[in-house]
Image (tube, grey):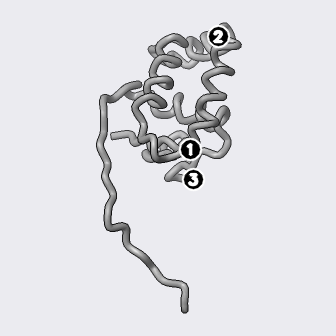
């Protein structure tokens, strides 16, 4: 018995639509603050291209944003995000709805 490396024999990735064009830095920072157990592919959160977001934390983040819309709307305006709180919440909810139900996380990729 040893510590062995194993290969995944089935790994399916399907991408759906894209959102938040050129807003990687803003969105990654927001997820970093609201979903503390998100795994980022890079040391510099702002420029990470692959994220693994726990679904339970994303659900909580959505409720936090909805509960303080004015604060987050002001933040998005200050950052010149180009999207509203309503659009943000709608897209985050879509991620939850369309994500793989077999996983307790959402895989997010910027490309």
User: Mark 3 sits on what residue?
Assistant: 43
Q: Are marks 2 and 3 in contact (CB under 8 Å)?
A: no
Question: CA separation, marks 2 and 3?
Answer: 29 Å
Q: Quadrant of the N terminus?
A: bottom right
- Residue at the image point whose x is 32% and y is 67% from the top: 9
The single residue placed furthest to the front in the displayed view is 102
Question: CA separation, marks 2 and 1?
Answer: 24 Å
Q: Earlier in the sequence, mark 2 or mark 1?
A: 1
- Where 76 sits versus 107, above or below? above
Q: In x, y percent, where is residue 58?
A: 59, 32
User: Mark 1 sits on what residue?
Assistant: 45
Q: Earlier in the sequence, mark 2 or mark 3?
A: 3
Q: In x, y percent, where is residue 107?
A: 45, 44
- Residue at the image point whose x is 44% and y is 24% from the top: 94
Mark 3 neighbour density, 10 Å: few (under 14) some (14–19) many (20 or more): few
The answer to which image quadrant residue 68 occupies is top right
Mark 1 neighbour density, 10 Å: few (under 14) some (14–19) many (20 or more): some
Q: Are marks 2 and 1 in contact (CB under 8 Å)?
A: no
User: Mark 2 sits on what residue?
Assistant: 69
Q: Are marks 1 and 3 in contact (CB under 8 Å)?
A: yes
Residue depth check, mark 2 versus mark 3: number of the one nearer the observer: 2
Q: What is the secondary structure assignment of the residue under circle 3?
A: loop
- Where 11 sits versus 48, above or below? below
- Residue at the image point whose x is 30% and y is 39% from the top: 15
Is 32 left, or right, of 95 in this rendering?
A: right
Residue depth check, mark 2 versus mark 1: number of the one nearer the observer: 2
Question: CA separation, marks 1 and 3?
Answer: 6 Å
Q: In x, y percent, where is residue 101?
A: 45, 40
Is 7 left, or right, of 56 in this rendering?
A: left
């Amino acid at each position: 018995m040893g510590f062995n490396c194993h290969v995944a024999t089935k790994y399916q990735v399907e991408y759906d639509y894209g959102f938040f064009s050129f807003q990687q830095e803003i969105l990654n920072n927001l997820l970093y603050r609201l979903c503390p157990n998100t795994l980022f592919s890079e040391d510099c959160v702002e420029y990470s291209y692959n994220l693994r977001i726990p679904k339970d934390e994303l659900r909580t983040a959505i409720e936090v944003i909805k509960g303080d819309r004015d604060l987050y709307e002001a933040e998005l305006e200050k950052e010149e995000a180009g999207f509203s709180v309503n659009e943000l919440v709608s897209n985050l909810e879509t991620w939850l709805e369309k994500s793989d139900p077999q996983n307790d996380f959402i895989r997010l990729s910027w490309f």
